[in-house]
Amino acid sequence: MTAQGVEVAGPTDVAIQAWEQLGPAAGRDVVIESVRRELVTAPAIAARTLSYPTLKRRGPLTTLLDDLAGGIDSFLELQAARAVLVGPDFAGIARHVRIGPVGRRFEADFYHAGARLDIETDGKRRHNDDLRRRRDLERDAILASVGIQTIRLTFEDVMGRPRWCQRMIADAIRARSAAPYG
């Protein structure tokens, strides 16, 4: 890519170089944010990695890009997908599904259709202020009005007590799957 006749790195190359040069955590965060902000797509990064024959940690980057292409759009969602929502109890969970009544559709981070269960990952960056919290409560009430239960997992929950998160979600899936819905 050129700018005013000067060769510069585009967002795809910047994401790859950040992955390689910043180390695992910071590189991962740059790749996730680049895709989340729609500066580049996960498939575009994956295709461009072919131009980097000596790319460091290619396997983990490929796995991350697969997760991002599958709908993951934050570090917390990635951790929930990898550390919490694993195993046969969670086989029916889909990522980034549109749910809710007609005219008030919302995107669920994770959704179990059979149990009508919405699982949200609430990081501090996007869920820390009073206005966002009130919007989340309104959203949860609207979903509850059509029989969809929301479980909200904080950063501390996912990172500090993933087994507790698994138990809460698995118990809700079992209870709601057994309950009759009209």
Image (tube, grey):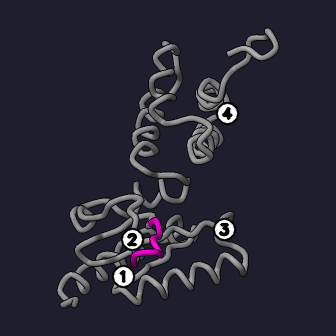
Q: Amino acid at mark 3?
A: Lys
Residue at the farthest right position: 4
Q: Identify the residue position indicated by label 1 in the image.
A: 148
Q: Identify the residue position indicated by label 3 in the image.
A: 124
Q: Amino acid at mark 4?
A: Leu
Q: Position of residue 48 (x, y in %)?
A: 50, 21
Q: CA distance from mark 1 to mark 4?
A: 41 Å
Nearer to us in this view, 146 or 108: 146
Q: CA distance from mark 2 to mark 1?
A: 9 Å
Residue at the farthest top position: 5
**Residue at the spot x=62%, y=38% of the render?**
39
**Residue at the spot x=58%, y=39% of the render?**
31
User: Which class describes the residues within 10 Å of circle 1: few (<14), some (14-19), or many (20+)?
Assistant: many
**Residue at the spot x=46%, y=17% of the render?**
50
Vertical placement of residue 146 versus 48, above or below: below
**Mark 1 vs 3: CB contact within 8 A:** no
Mark toward the start of the polypeptide (1 vs 3): 3
Q: Which mark is residue 48?
A: none
Foreground: disc 2 or disc 4? 2
Q: CA distance from mark 3 to mark 2?
A: 23 Å
Mark toward the start of the polypeptide (2 vs 1): 2
- The reply to whether the magenta stretch includes residue 86 is no
Q: Amino acid at mark 2?
A: Ile
Q: CA distance from mark 1 to mark 3?
A: 24 Å
Please report the bounds of the magenta region as a residue range.
Answer: 101-107
